[in-house]
Amino acid sequence: MMHELPVDRLAETAAALPHASLAGLREAGRTVLARQGFPTTKVEDWKYTDLGGVAALSRAWLAAGAPVDEPDTELVRRAQAGLDAHWIVIANGSVLEAFSDALALPGIGVATDASEFPKPHGALGGLNAALVRDPVRIRVSESLTKPLALLVADSATASAVTAQVRVNLAVDRGAAVQVFEHQVSSGDEGHYSNVLVELDLAADSRCDYVRLQQRATAHSQTARLDVRLDRDARFDYFGADLGGRLARHDLAVDIAGRGASATLNGVYVAGPGQHVDNHTRTDHRVGPATSRQEYRGVLAGRARAVWNGKAIVHAGADGTDAEQANHNLLLTEQAEVDAKPELEIYADDVKCAHGTTVGHLDERALYYLRTRGIGRQRARRILTRAFAATVVDSAPIAGLRETIGDAVEARLRDIMAEIGA
Amino acid sequence: MATEPENLEQLVNRRYKHGFVTDIASEGLPPGLDEDVVRAISAIKQEPEFLLEWRLRAYRLWREMAEPDWAHVHYPKIDYDAISYYSAPKSDKDRPKSLDEVDPKLLETYDKLGIPLHERAKLAGVAVDAVFDSVSVATTFKKKLADAGVIFCSFSEAVREHPELVRKYLGSVVPQRDNFFAALNSAVFSDGSFVYIPKGVRCPMELSTYFRINAANTGQFERTLIVADEGSHVSYLEGCTAPMRDENQLHAAVVELVALKDAEIKYSTVQNWYPGDEEGRGGIYNFVTKRGDCRGANSKISWTQVETGSAITWKYPSCILRGDNSVGEFYSVAVANNYQQADTGTKMIHIGRNTRSTIVSKGISAGKAQNAYRGLVRVMPQAEGARNHTQCDSLLIGKECGAHTFPYMEIRNPTAKVEHEATTSKISADQLFYCRQRGIAEEDAVNMIVNGFCKEVFNELPMEFAVEAQALLNVSLEGAVG
Amino acid sequence: MLDIKDLHAAIGGNEILRGLSLAVGAGEVHAIMGPNGSGKSTLAQVIAGHEDYEVTSGSVQYEGRDLLELAPEERAREGIFLGFQYPVEIPGVNNAYLLKAAVNAKRQHEGKDEIDAFEFLKLAREKMAALGMDPKFLNRGVNEGFSGGEKKRNEILQMAMLEPKLAVLDETDSGLDIDALKAVAEGVNALRSPERAIVLVTHYQRLLDYIEPDRVHVLSEGRIVRSGDKSLALELEEKGYEWVREAANA
């Protein structure tokens, strides 16, 4: 099989990792991975995203003795500049204590007890468990006054690198937390990171979550955010996928308590050579509960975007109100969108709707702007930015909206310059 | 005051209206499938060599294929060796020349179904090519059609009389290797309909076939081929119903449509096969491959279906929009009650420039049924200016059923405009109470709401078919609210 | 200022304008009237430069230049304003942004500096007050969720901000109640000046009760079949378009 990883190499690599107490977790991870192998495009959830390149990179990395780059502290400093937050910085899988003031807060630290972790789930969960260096555990009992910034700053300068990131975040009853997950990377060598964040929201708790993925365009990532909501918990999410050669994000929200609500919004921008894949899954296990979703994507050049939104309303989840929307803008030829909005409904007292569109800029709006004296190129930019702005402005941490808006615009500008449009 | 009706549960339990067994002895091949069976079928039908070779090739391909498992349906494994691949009514050797010569038992059968063939054919001006089990036994209005140059006959007759047309178009839309069920059909298809509309001809009447499944353990493998030559137009009606039986019956039909330049084909189906009893026993397994090829510029293929029957429905009438400016349409009502499972939808493949497609799917789930819409809209890089609009609505009646939507959109051209919308709703107690307060009986209110929900699709059916479809829907859902 | 000679224009292969000639001088207000389908909106769109309309023959001179050579945005910067019959909604682009971008595009074209943000807001608020518009409209998406009357006022606001030399108002009166009609008319009248020309495209003479035209032209089947002073509009109102058609055919 093309997508397998050598288990003996995984074991050797794991043996050299810090925290020997995590050996059980790592072994369990290897077992799952060996059994399932890397998913191929024959697996429905990976139909449009081929992990062959990522698997090959991982095999080569293991064969080379699993080298790890020095952290790019300059990259870290740049990312931290100007943002007032409690920081946890992870570089190539290791927590950088010097940059991570949040470690001083109660309930936050590197977890070294294997029994604290649930069984690895899925091949990528297995890979994560098998090779994780510094899993981070965060327990928020009292609301934090500043956002918690989780900076993943990877680098691959000397050689190709793969890195595992695992963060487990629990928010206690009635507490509130704002999380900013920021993904950056540097270096011209290949890099593959596999990120797993688990978020458990107790009754009446609340989490505002903003994710900004700006990895170097030579780098690939698979990432997963698993969220569980208890009674009356609230989760507001916004994600922006801007970088990476291959970027896959799985966002799974499990609504396990009545009165919970989740908002999942996102934007993706992809230019030549980029493949961006967002999968969301919302499990409504009880009702009443509400979920709202809107993802918007802009593509130009030989870019490909995949969007798969799945809402499952389980038997008995009456009073579920779920909406999803996905809108895509294809700016030039050669771009491709594969969209799949799914509903699976096993209860009748529900309100579910989804809408998906794929199209180009509205010619009438372009003409209207031109009759007001605005040139064609400028008019296109204005309309493209406006298309993305309607979701960017919904980012739950208001202080980050400008940062994200600027990042989206800068990425769009770069792409348009690259394809000479 | 409780607004939930109590008497409605009884209505759920109403028996299948069209359940009975026609006592016509069948003669056929023993169960099982191998190359000899394929050769035997071909020999019985006195087919030319090319067709035997074609069947054998399909059989060999089928042997290598696995039954698909991706659909949202569950059923016990089918034993393909327990199925008889050919049966025929006794009167086969002495085929009736007109309706008067048709086995009276068959006519009686249609009467029980509420389809008085004689009367209906005359009154509605519809030519009927009735398929009873596997061999066509009655064809009417041949002359009128012949005058217009239209060929409308059983598939077997087409093989004898027009082998060049069959050879040219058979398998050109659904190749033998297309999928497991299509390959099986290609190997053992028994009979079906063939239509050829010559250049520039507008078919003078709607063409219609009623399918029946009767003999125990007899798979039905219909093969339909409709070719509309340049500038021609045809409307084709397919309807079916089946008697009650305990054994599951497999049906794997293939329908191929070819529309050349400026031609239009409208294909309407009302499907009412036995869905199984209240416990989910029995019922037809319906695995159909239907596909239309808009081969020429400005051609149009429109599928309209009302699916109320079968234990399992696996069916995706599709359009390949090859010609520039060609148009594909899919209008569907799928009802699933009790333990029925439906996985149906369409594929619209945009290849030509300025091709347009419309999908309107209305799924109704009741009882313990599972109803899934599965669709694909693909816009190829060369399909400049392609347009698609999809509307996909589900109506849930009861707490134990499921409604699912699996739309795939694969868009590779920036000038395309693709829109997909889906909603899910239920018949609310408030709506029912409101109607009852206005003096409308609960059952009528349900029918009213359901028919309103389906209106967009019914509007696409030929008039008399629409009336039948509405009535059928009401019967299918009787007592579903409770 | 505007000189149209024997203009023929088609959309999707259908010829709509069939030899239309019209001259509009600075300081003049012209009303173009005519039944539905006579080509009124086509004329407005051809002047603005809509690319779906194909000019098959004839000429359009604007201030001595060939207007047909210019892109829509160039025409706008040269001082041509089209008030749309159906202004498009542009979600996500707010009104203030559009207005400022438009004003600056013109200023840049004229070699002027960009407008100061404070000055811009002050000016926009003044103009809005005059039109009876809530300043909150500045922060809403362009025409997004606006009522018909609000859209038309918004068009007049843009015109007031852009100070065009030639304003073509396409059915600006349609769908307006009497208060909105008056507000729009006042907005237009406020712009009347010896340097500016205004072309009103309208189906009814109602608007002309509030904006007095210098010349009235009747359009039928893509041609001007009759021209006169404002009394022509009243005569038309009285006798109906059938009268014009008969007169044209006679």
Image (cartoon, coloured by chain):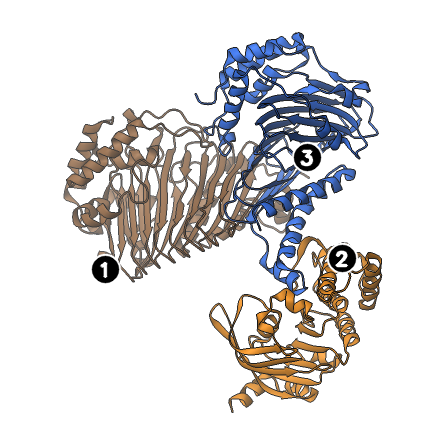
Q: Please state if B285 lies on the left or on the right of B443 as rendered.
A: left
Callouts 2 and 1 close, C-beta under 8 Å = no
Q: Please state if B38 lies on the left or on the right of C18 as rendered.
A: left
**Rendered shade, chain A:** blue
Considering depth in this image, is A89 or A38 the residue closer to the camera?
A: A89
Q: Amino acid type of disc 2?
A: Ala
Q: Please state if A359 lies on the left or on the right of B35 as rendered.
A: right
Cα separation between marks 2 and 1: 67 Å
Chain that is coloured orange in the picture: C
Q: Badge 3 sits on which subunit? A: A
Cα separation between marks 1 and 3: 67 Å
Dot 2: element: helix
Categorize mark 2 by other alpha carbons within 10 Å: few (<14), some (14-19), many (20+).
many
Q: Which residue is mark 2?
A: C96
Residue shown at 66% from the left, 20% from the top: A93
Categorize mark 3 by other alpha carbons within 10 Å: few (<14), some (14-19), many (20+).
many
Quarter assignment of residue A70: top right
Chain that is coloured brown in the picture: B
Whether labels 3 and 2 share one chain:
no
